[in-house]
Image: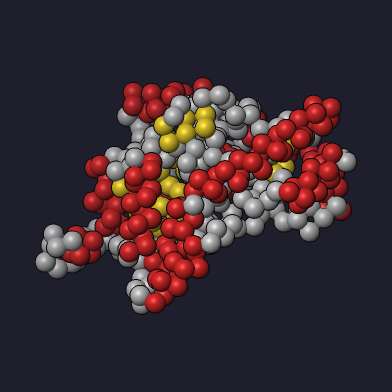
Amino acid sequence: MIPFNRPAIVGDEFAYVEEALRSRALAGDGTFGRRSEALLERTLGVQRALLTTSCTHALEMCALLLDVGPGDEVIVPSFTFVSTINAFALRGARPVFLDIRPDTLTLDERALEERISPRTRAIVVVHYAGVGCEMGVISEVSNRRGVPVVEDNAHGLFGAYRGKPLGTFGALAAQSFHETKNFSCGEGGAVLVNDARFVDRAEILREKGTDRSRFFRGQVDKYTWVDLGSSWVLSDVLAALLLAQLEARERIQAGRRAVWERYQAELADWALANGVLLPTVPPDRQQAFHMFQLRFPDLARRSAFIDHMLARGVKAVFHYQPLHLSPMGRRSGARPGDCPVTERVSDQLVRLPFYTELGGDEQGRVIDAVRAF
Ligand SMILES: *Cc1c(COP(=O)(O)O)cnc(C)c1O
C-alpha cells in the first residue's frame, strides 16, 4: 500500500535528539529551540519566531495577542482546518466565513471588504496547498480598514508571494510542524511575530502568563504572573528533531518539488482528457510544494476514483468539508449557499500521495493507477 503521507527523516535528527537527551535539558526554550527560532527569523526575516506545541496553540496565542473577545468577529475561509477558526471561537468570537477563489482555492479577496464590520478583529488567511493568497489586495484592505491579518501558514513555509516569504505579511502568522506538514517534529508549531509590538507579550503568553523569559535574560530579578497564558513551549527534544529538518530545508523542498513537477508533467494529458483540474499556481507565487490535488467534475466521480486507487494499493484522500456547514459553523448563522465555491470544491477534490521521499517506482505506480481511471 502506498500511504498518503510518510514523514521524512533527513539524517541529522538522530544525532540532534541524542544530543538533546544527553544534555539532560529536555524542557522547552533550550539550545535547539533557540537555534530553530533563529533559523526561522533569519531565513524569513521575521521579528521573532517562537516555537509552540502546535499550530493550533500558535493560533490560540494569536487570538489572545489580538485581544479577541465575545461579540467580536473574525473573517476566515470556510475551506480550512478547524483550528484556523476554533482558536478565535475559544475567545468568544463569531466566525464570518468567506468563500475561496475557484483557481487557487485561497480566500476570495474580492469578497473581503464587504464582510468587514466595526466588530471585525482579524482577517485570517490560509495559503492553501502552500500557494499564497492574493496578499497585495488583502494587505491593502487590512491597512486601510485597520484590521490585522493573521496567516495560518501551516502549508506555506518557505513559499512566497511576489518574492516575499509567506508568514511575513500578517501582524502574526502560525506554522505547523505536525507529522503531515513539509517540516515535522511529530507535533509542533510556531508563532511568527512581524509586528514588534507583540513580541514581549507573545513570550509571556507562551510561558504561562509569566515574565520568565525576561527573568532568564536578567531583565527582571524574579518572575511572576503578569498576564493570561498557557503552557505552549515546545520541548527541546522535539526542537532538536525540528532543527535537523529546518537545516535540510533545501533538500526537503527540492524533493517535494520533484514529486510535484512529475505529477504535473505526467498527468496533464490524462487530466485534460478526463475533465480533471490540476492545481493552479499563478506566476507571481513561489509555492511551498505542500500537496498535489485533483478536482473531479462531481462527487460521484471523486468517490469512484478514491475506490479505484484503493483497489490498486494507493491511498488518495479528500480534504476539508465546508466549515460554515458544520454543526458549529451553523451556530454562527451560516447557511448552505453562503460559500458556493467551497461547497462545490469540497466534493470534487482529492489529494494524491505526497511526501518528500516519494519518487521513482513508487510515484510511477501512483501515476499508472491514476491514468488507468
Ligand atoms: C495542520 C493544520 C493546522 C493545525 O496544525 P497542528 O500543528 O496540528 O495544530 C492548522 N491549520 C491548517 C491549515 C493546517 O493544515
Q: Is residue 288 left or right of residue 193?
A: right
Q: Is residue 6 left or right of residue 63?
A: right
Instruction: Indicate whether 348 appears above or below 143.
Output: below
Looking at the rendering, which quadrant does residue 44 occupy?
Answer: top left
Given the current orientation, which residue lies at the most extreme left position? 221
Viewer can see residue 360 = yes
Q: Is residue 346 left or right of residue 160?
A: right
Q: Position of residue 287 (x, y in %)?
A: 54, 35
Q: Position of residue 341 (x, y in %)?
A: 65, 30
Residue at 45% x, 73% y is 18
- The N terminus, quarter of image: bottom right
Q: How is the image coloured?
A: secondary structure
Query: Closer to the camera, 79 or 93?
Result: 79
Q: Position of residue 339 (x, y in %)?
A: 61, 32
Residue at 42% x, 62% y is 239
Instruction: Indicate whether 36 appears above or below 81.
Output: below
Residue at 43% x, 24% y is 136
Residue at 50% x, 45% y is 250
Query: Closer to the camera, 144 or 372?
Result: 372
- The C terminus, quarter of image: top right
Q: Position of residue 8 (x, y in %)?
A: 59, 57
Query: Closer to the camera, 122 or 103?
Result: 103
Numbered label tally: 0
Looking at the rendering, which quadrant does residue 162 occupy?
Answer: top left
Viewer can see residue 92 = no
Q: Is residue 324 left or right of residue 310?
A: left
